[in-house]
Image (spheres, grey):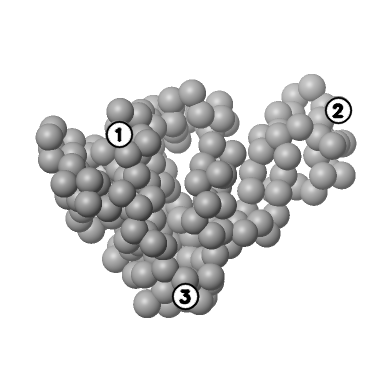
Amino acid sequence: LVTPETARTLALDRFVSLYERRLLVRDPITWLPPGNTEAVEQRFRFMEWEPAGRDSLARLIVRAYEGHVDSRINDQFTSEPGAAGFLRSLLQNEGCGEFFRPASLFAIDRRTEWLSGAILTSFVAPDTAHITQLCVAPETQGLGLGWELLRRALPALAETYGRRRALGAYFVIMFFAISVGFGYVFYLPDHPL
């Protein structure tokens, strides 16, 4: 993340690409209201993260990020080996903090038995959680699955450690994050001011 002044300077370099980023926070005391919970629960079953699901999750990440700005930045979102490397780093290297399994969930489509959504969380400080991944398969986007994953993860985060959470969000999920009560901490525009 860079300041707008630095972004203007970097934009002059033809070898530098800038991408929009927003860092958001949300008060953990206020729970999310149910969304389309009944329909989502009829279609999907939810389970806590299982290491055996890594390969399916790597495939889901690649599918969910197809055409997304992050797929232009690095291979963690464009290939299964890249996504598998991201997951290994998250679980073993604490690159995104300490992985927090109780608030990391899978959503399995009851119709196909495929992994259709996931939320992965970690703690980057004793009182600060990070949502390292929130993704939904393209064919199940718009059903409320992302909302339900977030709604289920937030209480586990709040109950265990923190009074504060941070979400590194992308423009694509920006409106979703604002609608569920996250507020801006930092904003880096896609285009220099």
State the residue at coordinates (26%, 38%): 116
Q: Residue at x 49, y 60 (%)?
A: 130
Q: Earlier in the sequence, mark 1 or mark 2?
A: 2
CA separation in Å, label 3 and label 2: 44 Å
Q: CA distance from mark 3 to mark 1?
A: 29 Å
Residue 12 is tagged as: 2
Quadrant in the rendering for residue 13: top right
Using residue 15 as the reference point, say whether residue 43 is left or right of it.
left
Q: Relative to 80, does residue 92 appear above or below in the rendering?
A: below
Across and down, in percent, residue 74 comes to 53, 32
Q: Where does residue 92 sit, x and y in percent of width and height?
A: 37, 56
Amino acid beneath label 2? Leu
Query: To which residue does mark 3 refer?
Result: 29
Rendered position, 133 above or below 67: below
Between marks 3 and 2 in the image, the one whose residue lies nearer the viewer: 3
Q: Is residue 89 visible?
A: no
The residue type indicated by label 3 comes to Ile
Residue to which mark 1 is pinned? 140
Q: Estimate the spatial distance between the alpha carbons at disc 1 and disc 2, rounded to whole Å.
A: 40 Å
What is the x, y in percent for residue 26? 54, 65
Q: Secondary structure at mark 2?
A: loop
Label 2 Cα crowd, 10 Å radius (few <14 / some 14-19 / many 20+): few
Question: Going 43% across and 25% down the picture, which residue do you hit?
Answer: 66
At label 1, which amino acid type do we have? Thr
Task: Give whichever of discs 3 and 2 has the lower sequence position.
Answer: 2
Under circle 1, the secondary element is helix
